[in-house]
Image: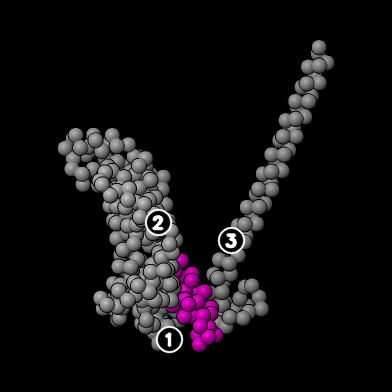
């Protein structure tokens, strides 16, 4: 009997040893795979950052890292006003992105609250129509949008800034599904308790719903900011003159044949510069991702 127990113990020990070995091998393989992916992801970023300090502004180099390093690319990028006015492009895009960010958050919160908390006759029809329209790429409407803006006198001069803010903001309310899904998880008992305490619908909205939705507000703010900051197609259609270009159009212009020989390294410098506001936005708002019910105040 004792021999059988000893054999079973040895067999069990061997099984646990093999299982531990397989787990270690699996962990090593997973970490190696993730390390390779990290290198693949980081190499282009490192190259762009290094290229931004390259003294040779031409697009052809014989080594991964520059042979001569300089800050001249950044200096020319912000001081040149005759060839490519990057500071103006940066300022224009930043203004558009900030306005779009604020307006998109207001639109999405309002529509999502109505769809989540209110019941009216055409509610389901509206959501189905928006869902179907969302299946079509927005680029299909570019031509129609341009002629509408042109008829309104918003396609020329400095009015293109207003036009881009309207275009980027107008359709954001249709992207309410993610926000609505989050609001659906908030118990309606909070709304009912607040209404019984004398709150109005608007007070329930900004004292109960908005504090709870902070993580989704952060998400929408980032999406609202990145849209105009990185968009190329709509900006290219609406901005007809170089004086009204956004940073995406400025980067595209730097790679054209008449500029590329002198602006390739400065293109890399501009790419580094336009990534800074995005990084700052993520750093400032990342703490809100973990916030949830703790922020609500019953009214």
Name, please, the residue furthest toward the top.
1
Q: Which residue is mark 1?
A: 83
Q: Is residue 45 above or below residue 33?
A: below
Residue 65 figure quarter: bottom right
- Identify the image quadrant of the C terminus: top left
Q: Residues within 10 Å of mark 2 (few under 14, many from 20)?
A: few
Q: Which residue is mark 3?
A: 41
- The Cα atoms of the two marked residues, 1 and 3, are separated by 33 Å
Tell me what residue is drawn at x 43 percent, y 86 percent.
Answer: 83
Tell me what residue is drawn at x 19 percent, y 34 percent.
Answer: 196
Look at the image and give the residue range highlighted in magenta: 250-275
User: x, y (%) of residue 163?
Assistant: 30, 72
**Residue in front for this viewpoint, 184 or 45:** 184
Residue 199 figure quarter: top left
Tell which circle, 1 or 3, labels the residue nearer the N-terminal end: 3
Tell me what residue is drawn at x 71 percent, y 35 percent.
Answer: 20
Q: Is residue 7 above or below residue 249?
A: above
């Amino acid at each position: 009997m004792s021999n059988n127990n000893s054999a079973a113990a040895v067999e069990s020990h061997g099984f646990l040893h093999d299982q531990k070995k397989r787990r270690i091998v699996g962990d090593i393989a997973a970490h190696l795979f993730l390390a390779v992916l990290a290198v693949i992801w980081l190499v282009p970023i490192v190259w762009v950052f290094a290229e931004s300090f390259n003294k040779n502004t031409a697009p052809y180099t014989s080594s991964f890292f520059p042979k001569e390093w300089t800050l001249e690319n950044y200096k020319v990028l912000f001081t040149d006003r005759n060839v490519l006015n990057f500071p103006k492009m940066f300022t224009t895009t930043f203004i558009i992105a900030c306005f779009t960010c604020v307006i998109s958050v207001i639109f999405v919160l309002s529509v999502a609250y109505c769809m989540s908390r209110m019941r009216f006759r055409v509610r389901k029809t509206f959501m189905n129509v928006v869902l179907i329209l969302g299946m079509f790429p927005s680029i299909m409407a570019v031509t129609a949008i341009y002629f509408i803006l042109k008829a309104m006198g918003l396609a020329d001069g400095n009015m293109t800034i207003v036009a881009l803010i309207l275009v980027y903001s107008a359709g954001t309310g249709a992207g309410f599904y993610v926000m609505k899904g989050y609001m659906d998880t908030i118990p309606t008992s909070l709304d009912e308790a607040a209404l019984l305490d004398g709150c109005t619908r608007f007070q329930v909205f900004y004292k109960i719903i908005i504090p709870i939705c902070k993580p989704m507000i952060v998400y929408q703010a980032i999406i609202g900011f990145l849209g105009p900051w990185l968009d190329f197609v709509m900006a290219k259609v609406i901005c007809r003159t170089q004086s009204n270009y956004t940073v995406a159009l400025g980067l595209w212009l730097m790679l054209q044949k008449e500029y590329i020989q002198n602006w390739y390294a400065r293109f890399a410098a501009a790419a580094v510069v336009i990534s800074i506001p995005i990084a700052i936005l993520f750093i400032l708002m990342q703490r809100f991702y973990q916030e949830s019910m703790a922020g609500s105040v019953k009214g």
